Amino acid sequence: MSTLMRATGTFTKLLSPSSHSFSLRPSASLLTRHQMSTEVENVITRLKNSGLLRSQGLIAGKWVDAHDRKTIKVCNPATGEVIVDVPCMGQKETNDAISSAFEAFYSWSKLTATERSKYLRKWYDLLIAHKEDLGQLITLEQGKPLKESLGEVSYGAGFIEFSAEEAKRIYGDIIPATLPDRRLFVLKQPVGVVGAITPWNFPLAMITRKVGPALACGCTVVIKPSELTPLTALAAAELSLQAGIPPGVVNVVMGNAADIGDAILASTQVRKITFTGSTAVGKKLMAGAAGTVKRVSLELGGNAPCIVFDDADLDVAVKGALAAKFRNSGQTCVCANRVLVQEGIYEKFANAFSKAVQNLQVGDGFTEGVAQGPLINEAAVQKVESFIKDAISKGAKVLLGGKRHSLGMTFYEPTVIGDVKSEMLLSREEVFGPVAPLLLFKTEEEAIRLANDTNAGLAAYIFTNSIQRSWRVSEALEYGLVGINEGIISTEVAPFGGVKQSGLGREGSKYGLDEYLEMKYVCLGNMNSN
Ligand code: NAP
């Protein structure tokens, strides 16, 4: 994502009156530049005092600038204000980070599982002890409401805790031999140095979901967070040092994404690349990994159907669809992208859902009661606008919202669009914004066909009171995760990942560790000799 795109939001926009009528509840008070600056300054001062506002990369345990001193600005999406400058790193710094991770790999992988587990546990304890600081940092650079940011810290830290526990349970196998004088073993060994590239929408959790299991298995890592949200990654890395995790085990570089990615791909020392982000970039990395035959894990975009059947409990369906759609202002890979509603409940659902959406308070993530923060940047708003324009031109109806919020900047009104059809962009692609498109269907078969009519296959949601139907439909959905009567299903103890073009591999749970392990078959022969 270019710096130019990110910096497009300006104060001029914040201060200019909206030309649209104001139909949704605003936050407690309309934001002024002065109020926002004061709030942000207070938060930044607190974070500086806590030592967690780092503004350099981390290589071999040292905080470093880019070799040519180039920097990029990290901005608060709610105000456009610059929080801090961070180094704009590239190939050289990435190669240094890879060398540092390669050097650290030998000793880190030789530690006992119990020792690695203790380091991870200490890191987890520090993440939780600094929950408030990290939550504020997430809201500051990403914009989500503070309550959601604090939830992300618990969720993100959970991967480190789970990995600390699982580190002690990485077992091999003994296979019954086919010849009497032989013994056959399977050893599980760390893959080696891992390159981890992560997006901006979960600045902590997308990193811990990779780094926790990698470290537990004995791997070392080079992390590349999004240039939009590197500060949480740097704070988490600082806490890893405080936890005593040796220098070089965790490295963080940020800046020129393509250069950093190319250096990771080209290196024969990096044995695995794990990526969370868009399908387009994921495909490039997958192709690039072929050059050195690296292992690849991909967590890519989704196009989640949320299917509401006639026999659903209306309140449960409204609550679940609201959570699945509007979390993080619609900017998650598992956000409901299409709400498919059966004809018998369509009107009732559309009314109740729109009413619930209308009550979502929009504003700066630090304001009490706010449920919808800004979108990440101007490009994100323009994408939402183009999808809505496309839908309206093809006959969809705006039931609620449908325009920029009067708060200005990148705030967008929580929106419900009715009469959406499967050929519209809203159905075909990830909107990644606070827009719920409603599609009507008649039969269970039609719902399954519509739901599977996409190249994506990450998350799906079903609302029904029929146990039989919930099983039937879950089995028929071509998705990696299915929520039944539940809109928020991610947890560190369950496997997370997509099928089709939503990705490869799984993160979280006991299965997530396999991604960082090589299997080695050892045959011990000549057993009968003394
Ligand atoms: P993105 O543009 O693909 O960026 C993701 C990461 O890749 C960022 O760190 C980005 O760096 C980096 N990047 C971009 N171009 C690169 C290149 N040529 N080589 C190496 N790295 C490169 O995605 P995003 O906009 O940040 O995130 C939104 C997407 O992520 C959505 O599609 C969403 O569904 C998906 N996502 C998936 C999951 C999942 O678990 N399946 C979870 C969260 C998000 P810069 O930002 O510095 O440019």
Image (cartoon, rainbow, N blue to C red):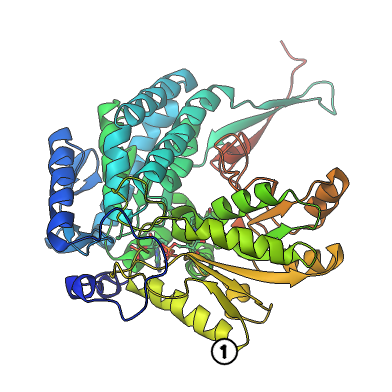
Q: Residue lying farthest bottom?
A: 393
Picture residue at 44% right of the left edge, 59% below the top: 329
Q: Is residue 143 above or below residue 467?
A: below
Q: Nearer the viewer, residue 244 or 34?
A: 34
Q: Nearer the viewer, residue 329 or 193?
A: 329
Q: Quick check: can you spot residue 143?
A: yes
Picture residue at 63% right of the left edge, 57% below the top: 458
The answer to whether mark 1 is within 8 Å of ligand 1 is no
Q: Is residue 63 above or below residue 329?
A: above
Q: Horizontal placement of 266 versus 170: left or right?
A: left
Q: Is residue 302 above or below residue 371?
A: below
Picture residue at 60% right of the left edge, 32% below the top: 188
Figure quadrant of the N terminus: bottom left
Badge 1 is on which residue? 393
Q: Is residue 488 above or below residue 72?
A: above
**Residue 257 at x, y percent in the picture:** 34, 65
Looking at the rendering, which quadrant does residue 325 occupy? Answer: bottom right
**Residue 22 at x, y percent in the picture:** 37, 71
**Residue 472 at x, y percent in the picture:** 85, 51
Q: Horizontal placement of 401 versus 60: left or right?
A: right
Secondary structure beneath dot 1 equals helix
